[in-house]
Structure formats: C-alpha cells, structure tokens
Image: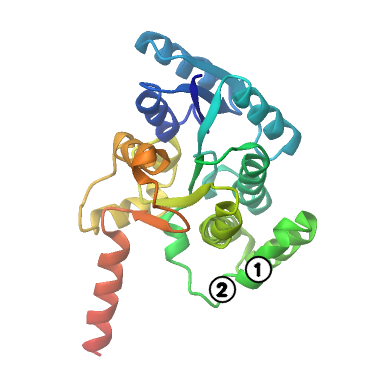
C-alpha cells in the first residue's frame, strides 16, 4: 500500500519544494487555498512524474481539513503531514493572521491526531518570529484554551495583540500565532506519543518565497543582511529539513522546535549581550 504525505500550503514556495522531494517515494496530497497556484504546482509535479492528488482546502475550515485527511487516508497509509500553510503580517488583519496560523494549525493537527496510525508524524512550520517576542508579551497561559474554546482563544489572542497600535497588530499577531504553533508542537507531544505519533515544529527565518519576500521591506531584509549566514534561505533548504523531520530517519525526534534561520537569532542575541556588556 502506498505511503501518503499531506502537504498543506503545498503550492507555496516551501510546500512545493517539499512536495517535489517527498514525492520521490510517497503519494503526495497537495493542499492549498489558492486554486491558481495549486494548478501551477500540479503541473510541475506532473512534469516530475510524482503521484499526487491536488485538493483545494482552507485550513481554517475544520470540515474541509477533515475531508482532506479522509482523502489522504483513502489513498494509502498516512505517513506524514507537513503543515506549511500560513500567512504573513503583510497579507491581512491581525484576526486573519491569527485565525489562519493558529486555528489552522489546530485544525490540521487535531484532524491528523484523530486519523493517523502509529508511526505517523506531523511537522508544523512555525517561525523565527516565535523566538523574538519577550516572554511577558506571549499569552502562553491562554494557549491551552484553543483546544476547548476556539472562540474565547481568538478573543484573548486579539486582546494580547491590541497592546500596540492597530497598524502594528498584524505583526504581533504573526509572532503570537507562530509562538502558539511552537507551543502546541511541544505541549501536545506526550498526548500524540500515546498513539505512537510524532509531532514537532520547524521555525524558518527569511526564505526566498512569495510570502517571505513580502516582508523584505518590513524588516526581514535587514535581518538577512545581519545574519550569521547573510543571505535569504532557499526553499529547497527548508524542504530537505521538513522531509527529514517527517521521515522514519527522524524517528526519535518529537516535541521540539528546530530553528532554521541562518543564525539570525544567534547573531541578535550575541550582539545584544555584547552591547549590554559595553554599557
């Protein structure tokens, strides 16, 4: 029976690069909310001889996500879900960013948990932004509420974002939502392990994707210039990491977040330390 890998946000830069790699030995279920990009990505996979099924899916719609996972399990053994779907601050309001990144992650992971069999893995894409907010700004105590009352969770998350002017709230929502992704991937590890499932997240820095380049003028470009590796990351570099994390080769890897940012956070932390020592 075929081993199946689901890739959400599969028509984006990271998702598409990952599909090309994982599709070498898996049936790929390529999911995206943008039909134009999904059609384009499907054409690329056709050219590579990848066995796939393209599904238009909005991850904020739990019923659509459940249908997506049902489709995947109907094609073979569900080996992995690589959840790259998400939006950046420039793409919408704080509510839109929070719902897509946080509730979307909740929907995909909970649907996976309900359907996956022992040995399956889910890899979530968080962000280096989740490593940048001061801990006292991140409403971590309210994060567990997402599992029991999503509406109340959204209310509390948007209230946490309202500490800054409205024009800055999408940026805070992005960092908080990705902090939730990182938290969930750690906090739910033991529960997932009870079913023989692995769960973890990867936090990318600035990558040469359509979404990543949208943030070039909003600070990402400056951080790239100051990184230990002073360049934008390539989608293929994320794809290799995501594919490894989802594979059986990483069978002992769970309940953690892997920062893949070209050394941005390390450089910023060390510069801050040196500056503090010199004051």
Query: Which residue sits at x=43%, y=47%?
Result: 215
At 60% from the left edge and 47% from the top edge, which residue is drawn?
Answer: 105
**Image quadrant containing the C terminus:** bottom left
Whether residue 18 is visible here, answered yes or no, is yes
- The front one of 70 and 251 is 251
In the image, is 277 to the left or to the right of 167?
A: left
Observer able to see residue 207: no
Q: Is residue 96 left or right of residue 122?
A: right
Using a 10 Å C-alpha cutoff, classify the residue at mark 1 as few (fewer than 14 neighbours), some (14 to 19) or many (20 or more): some
Badges 2 and 1: C-beta atoms under 8 Å apart? yes
Residue ranking furthest to the bottom: 279
Looking at the picture, does residue 177 appear above or below residue 271? above
Colour scheme of this structure image? rainbow
Residue positioned 20% across, 58% down in the render: 228
Q: What is the count of numbered marks? A: 2
Q: Where is residue 23 in the image (x, y as percent from the top left)?
A: 40, 22
Q: Residue 137: which numbered mark, if any?
A: 2
Tell me the crowding category of disc 2: few under 14, some 14 to 19, or many 20 or more residues within 10 angstroms, Cα based. Answer: few
Q: Label 1, on which residue?
A: 160
Q: Position of residue 34 (x, y in %)?
A: 58, 25
The relative height of residue 239 versus residue 77 in the rendered view (above or below) is below
User: Which residue sits at x=43%, y=23%?
Assistant: 26
Q: Which of 140 and 205 is in front in this view?
A: 140
Of 252 and 141, nearer the camera is: 252
Label located before the other in sequence (2 or 1): 2
Q: In this view, does 86 lie above or below 49?
A: below
Q: Where residue 16 appears, x then y in whole percent?
A: 42, 27
């Amino acid at each position: 029976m075929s081993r199946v890998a689901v890739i959400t946000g599969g028509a984006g830069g990271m998702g598409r690069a990952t599909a090309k790699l994982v599709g070498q030995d898996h049936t790929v279920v390529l999911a995206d909310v943008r039909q134009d990009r999904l059609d384009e990505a499907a054409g690329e996979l056709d050219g590579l001889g990848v066995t796939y099924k393209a599904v238009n899916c909005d991850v904020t719609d739990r019923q659509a996500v459940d249908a997506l996972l049902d489709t995947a399990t109907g094609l073979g053994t569900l080996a992995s879900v690589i959840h790259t779907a998400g939006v950046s601050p420039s793409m919408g309001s704080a509510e839109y960013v929070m719902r897509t990144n946080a509730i979307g992650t909740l929907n995909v992971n909970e649907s996976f948990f309900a359907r996956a069999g022992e040995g399956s893995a889910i890899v979530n894409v968080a962000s280096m932004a989740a490593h940048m907010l001061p801990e006292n700004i991140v409403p971590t105590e309210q994060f567990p509420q997402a599992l029991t009352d999503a509406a109340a969770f959204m209310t509390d998350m948007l209230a946490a974002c309202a500490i800054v002017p409205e024009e800055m709230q999408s940026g805070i929502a992005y960092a908080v939502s990705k902090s939730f992704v990182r938290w969930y991937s750690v906090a739910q590890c033991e529960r997932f392990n009870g079913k023989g499932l692995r769960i973890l997240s990867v936090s990318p820095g600035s990558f040469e994707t359509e979404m990543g380049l949208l943030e070039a003028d909003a600070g990402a470009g400056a951080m790239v210039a100051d990184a230990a590796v002073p360049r934008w990351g390539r989608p293929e570099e994320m794809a290799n990491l995501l594919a490894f994390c989802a594979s059986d080769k990483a069978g002992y890897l769970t309940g953690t977040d892997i920062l893949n940012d070209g050394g941005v956070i390390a450089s910023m932390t060390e510069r801050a330390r040196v500056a503090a020592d010199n004051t």
